[in-house]
Image: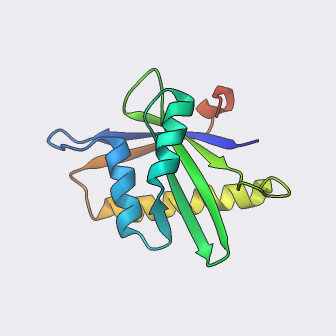
Amino acid sequence: MSSVIRLSLRPEEHAKVIPLEVLQDFADVQSGWSYLEDDSAHYADLKGRPAVILRHRVDPSTYADLGFVGTAEDAQTLDLAVLDRPGADAPLPPDERAALINAFLEAMRDYLSDRPDHVTLHVDRNAANSASS
């Protein structure tokens, strides 16, 4: 089972980036994060909408993936799911999922603080209770 929260990355008036591009750049510049191009393409095909997979590597042997997929309602709104590791014996415990989401949000806010003219981040943890991953 995946934890899902709803994010909206809203472009500023003169920004020329879309939320998925922001996530790709974020993974390029933030330590411990990487963009998985092939996995992103597979996830997009699976969901039938644009999608990005980011990997957060806590240490050389520990990682977790975050899946972002555009919603049908709004191209600027993304659903974020914490994806269970392939081949894992058990799903990620809820406290580890929450910690991973918080680590992402902290890193993303830090990233955006250096780019105030690109996008703003809005998080709705409650709206996603009815969303599917």
Which is nearer the eye, 107 or 66?
66
Which of the two residues, 123 or 63, is positioned nearer the viewer here? Answer: 63
Q: Is residue 45 left or right of 96 when viewed as pictured?
A: left
Quarter of the figure with residue 26: bottom left
Residue 79 visible in this rendered orientation of the protein: no
Q: Is residue 63 above or below residue 93?
A: below
Determine the residue located farthest toward the top in the rendered image: 73
Left/right of residue 101 with respect to residue 2 in the rendered view: left
Q: In the image, what residue occupies the spot 55% across and 46% down?
A: 67
Nearest the camera: 106 or 54? 54
Residue at 85% in and 58% down: 89
Most distant residue in the right direction: 89
Relative to 17, 91 lies left or right: right
Rendered-image quadrant of the C terminus:
top right
In the rendered image, the residue lying farthest to the left is 14
Q: In the image, is residue 96 above or below residue 130? A: below
Residue 78 location (% of width, % of height): 47, 37
Q: At which x and y percent is residue 75?
A: 37, 29
Observer able to see residue 62 = yes
Residue 54 position within the rendered picture, expressed as x and y whole percent measured from the top left: 50, 55
Which quadrant holds residue 95? bottom right
Q: Position of residue 19 (x, y in %)?
A: 35, 43
Question: In the picture, which quadrant includes the N terminus?
Answer: top right
